[in-house]
Amino acid sequence: MKTTVRRQIILAAGSDLLSTFSAQAFNFAVGLYLLALTGSAFSFGLILLIGPCVTLVLAPLVGKLVDAYKHQHLLVISQLFSCGGLVAFLLLLFLLPQQRFVWIILAVILLRALALLTTTAYQTSVVYLVPVTQQQRLNSLEQAANSLATIVAPIIAAAAYTSWGFIWLVYVEIFGELLNLLAFTQLDFNFAGRQQVPKKLAQQRLRQTFNYLWRIPALRLLLLFGLQVNFFISVLNVGLPYVLLRQLHFTNSMYAFTDSMLGIGMVVAGLSLAKRTLRWPLKIIVIGIFIFGGLLFILALVMWLPAYQLLFVCMVNFGLGFCLLIINTLEQTFMQQTVPRQQQGHVFALFSAVVQIMIPLGALFYGYCYDHYSAVWLFAGTGASILLVSGLLWHYYQTVTCQ
């Protein structure tokens, strides 16, 4: 039993590490290639918008597919289509190079759509892969693997892109998809329970799924927390590079080091969570969000420090990464154990679509704010907003559940 569980976890976390590494390397190379091709930052913005738009449009269809068909079959089919799409992309680049920009955009759309299907089908499969007592461990190790891949992939991708060019990183992505396909064929998707596929497809509308999410206080709380975090995280994604490089005059290597601390914090948090099962996940999520807001306050204070700015920024980034991974892991585990298995496809797909909408909205909001307001006040104001909104949401949740 223990040997089989260990095998399931190793296969799942290992495939996550390899697939995330290849996908991150490919995405990084796409950004560099588009910049060289167009010479415009607009292409970066277009790539960033594709993910949320694809998720929003396809969430109802993906949820319906995941709840109606065998998860393993969907995962295998998704990987096969990804490999086939990448091969077709390579052929089009060679045969019709004058339309390279169009082929890249279409390839990114296809891969994001298939990634949505793969992610949703896999998240709903965790309850069948390992026992309930091991779900947090699996989720935390996978989050740690993803974080490690996110740290390493851009470094290796930059070196590979410079040495060998964009095409070789497409080969790396195909290789990663094939390894993921192999892992999905080796995992036992009936180990902790057998998926019950409905004989007749239930017509569950988007509004019904949203009503289900909103009707249950704990899921409503997680949804509102997800919207808040994804919006406010843009204060870092948009402003931190500008602040560190332009205002604090960090060198590129210093900035890269501080940025890596975010991922290191996530890896440490993932490994820590894998060793223990935390009770009261909602309370810990709330504490993590409060700490997240407090760290933004500290980041605002760092701007006024005459010395040791590098040390303090590294410590804050490590703490932010640590908190974010704990929040994400406990949220994912809680939803897997709370939402009925037959509805997880619809619910997870819609949840992902709704919270991802806030990423581009937050980027637009903070992009405007950084042009008109001081970074110190933006960090401090965002930290205060997180503390205030989170406190109100938690108070509202306790009031509703006590009635």
Image: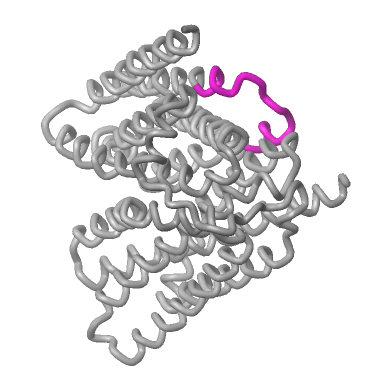
Residue 30 x, y percent position in the rendering: 36, 67
Left or right: where does residue 315 sit relative to residue 97?
Answer: right
Residue at (42%, 66%) from the top-left corner?
Answer: 111
Q: Give whichever of 127, 64 is nearer the camera.
A: 64
Which picture quadrant has residue 210?
top left
Q: Position of residue 390 (x, y in %)?
A: 39, 18
Q: Extreme bottom residue here?
A: 95
The answer to whether any part of residue 154 appears in the image is no
Q: Is residue 5 left or right of residue 43?
A: right
Q: Nearer the viewer, residue 268 or 350?
A: 350
Seen from this angle, which residue lies furthest front?
200
Residue 140 colored in magenta in the image: no
Task: Pick whichever, 241 or 322, lies toward us.
Answer: 322
Residue 271 is one of the magenta-drawn residues: yes
Q: Main secondary structure of the magenta part?
A: helix
Please report the residue visible at 37 percent of the width from the left and 47 percent of the height from the top: 205
Q: Which residues are magenta?
A: 269-285
> Residue 237: x and y, percent?
33, 40
Residue 240 against residue 124 in the figure, above or below: above
Q: Is residue 320 visible?
A: yes
* 86, 43: nearer the viewer: 86
Q: In percent of the image, x 63 and y 39: which residue is there?
A: 140
Q: Residue furthest left?
A: 372
